[in-house]
Image (cartoon, rainbow, N blue to C red):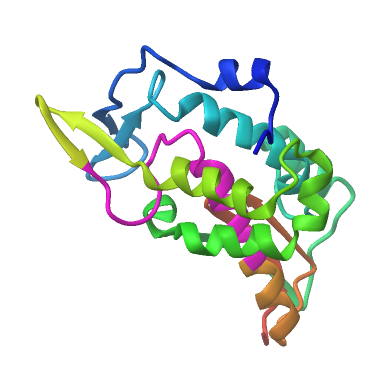
Amino acid sequence: MKCINKFSKQSLYNAHSTAPILYGKLKTHKTPAKLRPVVANYNGPTQRLAKWYNNVLKPFVEKNPYDIKNAQNLVQKLKGTIVEDPYMLVSFDVKELYPSVKTEDAVTTIRENWSEIEKNSPIKDLDVFIEGFQLCCNSGYFKFNEKTYRQLSGQQMGGSLSSTAGKLVMNRLLDHVLQESDVKPKFIFKYEDDLLLAVKECE
């Protein structure tokens, strides 16, 4: 099919990959402290391919009015903004974002915006592009205590493509909600699974 050249093929292929490992990361900012299951996928079979997809999708994913990069970026965006009556600040935290992100929903976003995404993709065949994307998102296996497991739904915390898949789904959801809802925020900002909005109290 020759969607990519020989050099790209060699750079994406890892003949000496290792199985991703599951470990626990302590949530020190929450009481009582809990462990967050994270998959270390530094040398996994699809890690290089997932990185390639991240680079291809990055221009489209970042082209939205919601995402902020860090606290300094938020301060810059809010500079000069005054929140006063009848507006109030509200925040939301998406519970278990990555395990809730279905690959099919991310694929739907890609299909709906392929004309934009294709501009940055060496692969021009949409079906082939999606096949590789699904391979990365659905190959969620890992090792723990010398046993091998596979995550059956959603995306892995720590997965190479999980953040991008989450943004594809979240941004599409926000677009839809804001178009259909009577609530019209003064502003809305998102950092991964955290949202900050200014809305009218009556809404």
Q: In the image, is 135 to the left or to the right of 28? A: right
Task: Determine whether 95 is above or below 28 in the image.
Answer: below
- Work out whether residue 192 can be spotted: no
What percent of the width, then of the height, locates residue 118? 78, 47
Task: Determine whether 134 is above or below 6 in the image.
Answer: below
What percent of the width, then of the height, locates residue 100? 40, 60
- Work out whether residue 124 can be spotted: yes
Residue in the picture at 28% in, 38% down: 141
Pick out the residue farthest to the top.
16
Task: Determine whether 181 is above or below 20 in the image.
Answer: below
Is 97 within the magenta?
no
Quadrant assignment for the C terminus: bottom right
How many numbered circles are shown? 0
Quarter of the image for residue 121 reads top right
What percent of the width, then of the height, locates residue 68? 71, 43
User: What range of the chain is rendered magenta?
Assistant: 150-172
Q: In the image, is 144 to the left or to the right of 191? A: left
